[in-house]
Amino acid sequence: MPDHPLTYDWRAMVRDRLRAAKLHPQDEAELVEEMAQHLEEQFRDLAASVGAEAAHERLAAQLRDQSLDEAVARRRRRAAPSRARAWSSASIWRDVRYGFRSLRRSPGVLAAGTAALALGIGLTTMMFSVVYGTLIKGLPFDDPSRIAYVAYTDPQHGMFDGGAPQGDFQRFAARQRSFVGFGGLYGGTATITGGDRPDRIAIARMTAGVFDVLEVRPMLGRVFVPSDNQPDAAPAAILGYAIWRDRYASDSSVIGRAIRVSGKSYTVIGVMSEKFQFPDLAQIWLPLQLNPSLVPSKGQPLNIVGRLRPGVDYASANAEFRGLMKQLDAERAKPATERPVVLPYVRATLPKRVYTLLYSMLAAVMLVLLVACANVTNLLLDRTLGRSREIGIRTALGASRLSVVRQSLVESAILAALAAIVGTVLAYVGVILFNGAFGESERRFWMDIRLHPAVLMFVVAMAVLATLVSGLLPAIQAARLDVSSILKDESHSASGLRVGRMSRLIVGFELALSSALLVGAGFLTKSIVKLRSVDPRFVTASVFTARLTASPADSLKQRAFFESVERELGTVPGVDASYLGNGLPGSRMSADRFQIEGRTYKGDRDYGRTRTLAVTPGFFATFGVPVLKGRGITADDRQGAPPVAVVNEAFVRENFRGADPIGHRLRLGDSDSKADWVTIVGVIPTLYTVTMDDPFPPAVVTALWQEPRLTTLTLAVRGRADAASAPAIRKLVASLDPEVPVYAASTMTEELDRPTWTLRLFGNLFIVFGIVSLVLATIGLYAVMAFAASRRVRELGIRMALGASSRDVVRLVSRQGARQIILGLTVGIGLGMLFVRAIRAVLFDVRPSDPSVFVLVVGVLATSAFVACIVPALRATRVDPLIALRSE
Amino acid sequence: MLTDELKKGSAEFLILSLLEAEPRHGYELQKLIESRSKGVISFHVASLYPLLYRLEDRGWIVGRWVEKAGERRRRFYRLTASGKDALEAQRDSWREFVAAINRVSGVRYA
């Protein structure tokens, strides 16, 4: 007998031949079986005489013969399942009921699958609520996508949105055609007096056009009209709802009454509704006075908003403004370095890092969802395998491949639907927690984070995604199962191996994603720990602070007022030390350039940079700051005396290389500074300043009473003082000047916590993401390893019967997991590094390459992965070889 | 060499005859016809099965999947009662037909 390959797949050839006939699967299966058998045997006989190739050729030709079609036609016993029938609502409903029944029989799969997907969907939905409410939804006005912001960007100086001078704005307003409404505004704070106590509130000055842009109506009275912006117009004011309610007892006769804002009188012309907020925290709106004589580049910098004319898009608006800017440049002494850029309002007014941060967070939770899906995929693959006999029988009984696929998908859809419900509840709770942690000072007026209808649509989309991602692979596996081999094969070993390989791949993928998330979580945890344990090097406990703005008056009167505040503060009961300054250590220090006498600087950029703070002598006692060298600021450092300053150690290190700085003189500001030269008289420790990148910067502390102008100052008292001190301090200030507001009252600890809320909020979120994905991945790995070990019970039994020790078995089983652990970790760490770069903005004093985090993450993951491997392995060793050998 | 017409007419008869003794499967039928006719009559997959299924549709034969010990599962065809009647009828008419041909052509059995 000549050698010949017996490897022609006659089954496949017959199946190909019959495909066009679209038979019912059972008819097809019978035909294929009968004819393939015939051809196989005939081939064996024929090949022996004429050779394999010739035999194959001859039989293949016979198979192509037209007359076979008659046989096929005669075998069409049943109608092929039609697509329409397979997808009728009745049959889908049957699948759903069947899916429920069969899932109820395996409550483990039901619970684990739902829990995993619910965590994934819940986290993604919560994060999407945040992204939608802050970045996507837009302003709370009609057709918000058409509300544009004209930003003045200066690429040369790396500046975005420096504001457009009023002179430029007025020409734009007269010439532009892109917008139906066009307005300019600027925000500020003002003191409002009258009523029971003075207060400091946010205000905005705006042109009438702003209301055209927003298309809002007042609740009472009217909004601004163009004549309100004329230079000689009577001063008018529009009140916010809260002020109207609190200060005017919701009195509708307030229209026409006079109010005092920062010492000037305005007539109330309107009250806005409760919902109206623009921009940000403004509570009173005053008209912006136009000045036709202003030339381009002159005047107050304004924020410009516009409502796009129907049919005009952002590209053409940008083109128009580039053209207008050229005209304006021709009218200036020298062309401006800024360029106007027209952008949607939210995009233009939120820093880019917020976009990066929020979208990275969304990407991160999508990864968590993928990990959850991967887990469910594994659960379902395992089920598919366990059910392969059932699927085989269903197919043999006439179920089409499509309906087998659908049945699998219906099951993952049931899991996803249940998970969507639980996930929505999780997201609801998450959003409440998120809103609670969201720093009020950073909340922009349009931000409205809750489960909007669009968010619920997102839940549906995520559920569909989860269905497909977690259900498609098992479904395809189910459809690919070979019916006749399953019906014959009792142990399902062949299909088991195939599914096992897929599961291991999925687990490798899960490990990669979780390690990426854990790297992110690790960096943020390290940041938070560092932030919590940082020693500010000044006293924060039992220090209470507030701000004061002097009534408008000449500077001598204001100075006299503050001096009496300084004197009187010490007499408040319970106050051990008191401070006044133009800011606060830690949270509110100014930044400035400076030069040191006797040194040469080529240009402004070469000047030094430092934090600055002007303080009263009480600074050292209130904050417990020691003077390390020389002297501190004393009561003698007043106007008329030589100006002095103390510098911190970082300043000495950077500018004097550690040499003695005392006696040197420096001047704040750059080359055109008119400030006095100040003499360094002392050195203090470097105090903590809340910034992400440089928490211990150089600083220059000057004498408050040597400052030329004082209007708004910060006070601080130390002692048995807490929030309860506020009334005592208010009373004291009111006794000195009843029109001075005491505001922004808080403890020093709150003051230092406030700027870092983003880090704490997002850091905590990330830690949740990381832990959830770690748990999911560990469970996933455990499931796969346990499954693999259980498939090998027989083999392991034989090995142990032949003398393998438990150690050998453990090594054998866990070695299988090692490869995917190593691969997953390697890929994951790489992903994590990319990720950390994206969230650098919220890292506190940790370098993105910090190896300790990576070591820790690898350690944590490797440990949990090892446990997931070793437990099933140990269980495998407890198998009784006799039982194992008998098992099928 | 047998013409296609003749073969077609005789094929049903041959298959019914072969199934009279015992149930057989497709490839066995093909082999038996080829060997007993010394290669004069031969079938292949595409010619045999339309015939088998036609006979089955008519109710003369019936196919059934049978698993014998130590052998693979095969579809065996056996003659039904009406198949037996049909075979007898065909035998009679063949006998008459052959006799008639003999009388006309003078061909004698060897």
Image (cartoon, rainbow, N blue to C red):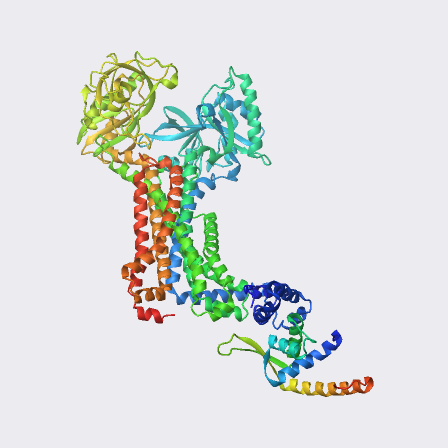
Q: Position of residue A167 (x, y in %)?
A: 50, 20
Q: Is residue A186 above or below residue A494?
A: above
* x 46%, y 65%: residue: A99
| Residue A116 seen in render | yes
Q: Quadrant of residue A630?
A: top left
A540 or A356: which is nearer to us? A356
Residue A144, percent from left and from top: 50, 39
Is A229 rendered above or below residue A345? above
Q: Is residue A55 left or right of residue A751?
A: right
Q: Position of residue A737 (x, y in %)?
A: 28, 24
Pick whichever, A813 or A846, lies toward us. A813
Q: Toward the viewer: A102 or A202?
A: A102
Nearest the camera: A574 or A400?
A400
- The N terminus of chain A, quarter of image: bottom right
How far across and down, in percent of the image, does residue A719 sit?
A: 18, 32
- In the rendered view, does A420 fall on the left or right side of A782? right
Quadrant where the C terminus of chain A is found in the figure: bottom left
Task: Write the residue at 30% across / 54% down.
Answer: A867
Residue shown at 68% from the left, 85% from the top: B86
